[in-house]
């Protein structure tokens, strides 16, 4: 469904129903589609919502408004419009930082945070040469294929590979550049003491984008009530690589 949020149209996938809602947010250059398998598993018990963040997937791409707080504002307004009461926020990579920013506002009804290989609340450690390669590679299939190889470890089907590439290629230039040049560099660490709900992190042992040591150094020290699990033989795209294992992890942490 399409939802008018803060003056733009956001694409939202919805499955299931229940007294609690799981809100799923995707990685940089991804889309809500990465969560479909996980949602299929969990929708028998929970209302599941997955959002294409502005400039990604099938959501509108305004010229401006791509800060971490802008994206958090979109999710906050979506929660209000859809009358979400009790909810768990699930953020992946880039949207892990968005989830942290929203949680620091202590929104009514938020019960827990589940973070999948989250971008840290301090500037993300992207080497300058890699940042430039990503900037130069926007919209190029050859670059998208290289990114896919770098951020996955567990084997995925050809259909999944093509969807990951397609999501990369349809990410707007505005959102792409804004994250690499500004959003990933934002420092929101001073807000982390305001997070009052438990945080559960899961990361792939072979994650080459945000490895486990990044979580140890740049995420865990800023959070009070936090756990971390490391999955063997998995990379950065856990919702695509190991959806069943990830769904089990989420269910276990929110029971």
Image: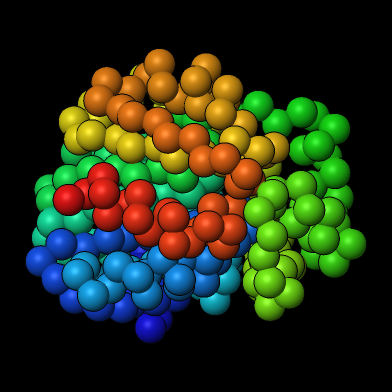
Question: Does the image show residue 55?
Answer: no
Left-right relation of 9 to 17:
right
Protein image colouring: rainbow
Left-right relation of 187 to 182:
left
Left-right relation of 75 to 18:
right
In the picture shown, does residue 170 fall above or below 92? Answer: below
**Looking at the picture, how far across and down is residue 10, in whole percent?**
43, 72
Q: Number of labelled discs?
A: 0
Query: Residue at 13% across / 56% down in the picture?
Result: 86
In the picture shown, does residue 189 fall above or below 162? Answer: above
In the picture shown, does residue 199 fall above or below 224? Answer: below
Query: Residue at 54% across / 53% down in the picture?
Result: 238
Depth check, front residue: 176 or 130: 130
Query: Residue at 57% across / 62% down in the picture?
Result: 240
**Looking at the picture, how far across and down is residue 101, in whole percent?**
36, 38
Quadrant assignment for the N terminus = bottom left
Query: Residue at 73% across / 74% down in the picture?
Result: 158
Question: Does the image show residue 219?
Answer: yes
**Looking at the picture, how far across and down is residue 177, in whole percent?**
69, 49
In the image, farthest residue toward the front:
232
Depth check, front residue: 201 or 96: 201
In the image, farthest residue toward the bottom:
1
Left-right relation of 224 to 52:
left
**Looking at the picture, how far across and down is residue 196, in whole percent?**
18, 31
């Amino acid at each position: 469904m399409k939802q008018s949020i803060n003056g733009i149209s956001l694409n939202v996938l919805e499955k299931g129903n229940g007294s609690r809602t799981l809100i799923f947010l995707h990685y940089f250059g991804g889309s809500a589609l990465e969560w479909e398998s996980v949602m299929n598993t969990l929708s028998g018990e929970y209302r599941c919502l997955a959002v294409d963040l502005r400039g990604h997937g099938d959501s509108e791409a305004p010229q401006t408004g791509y800060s971490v707080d802008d994206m958090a504002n979109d999710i906050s307004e979506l929660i209000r419009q859809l009358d979400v009461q009790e909810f768990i926020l699930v953020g992946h990579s880039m949207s892990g930082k968005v989830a942290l920013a929203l949680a620091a506002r202590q929104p009514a009804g938020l019960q827990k945070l589940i973070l999948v290989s989250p971008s840290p609340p301090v500037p993300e450690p992207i080497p300058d040469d890699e940042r430039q390669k990503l900037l130069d590679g926007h919209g190029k299939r050859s670059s998208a294929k290289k990114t896919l190889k770098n951020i996955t470890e567990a084997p995925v089907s050809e259909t999944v590979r093509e969807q990951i590439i397609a999501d990369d290629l349809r990410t707007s230039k505005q959102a792409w550049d804004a994250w690499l040049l500004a959003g990933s560099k934002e420092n929101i660490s001073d807000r982390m003491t305001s997070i009052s709900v438990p945080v559960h992190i899961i990361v792939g042992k072979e994650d080459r984008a945000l490895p486990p040591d990044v979580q140890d150094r740049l995420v865990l020290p800023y959070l009070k009530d936090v756990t971390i699990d490391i999955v063997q033989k998995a990379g950065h795209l856990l919702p695509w690589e190991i959806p069943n294992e990830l769904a089990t992890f989420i269910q276990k942490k929110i029971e």
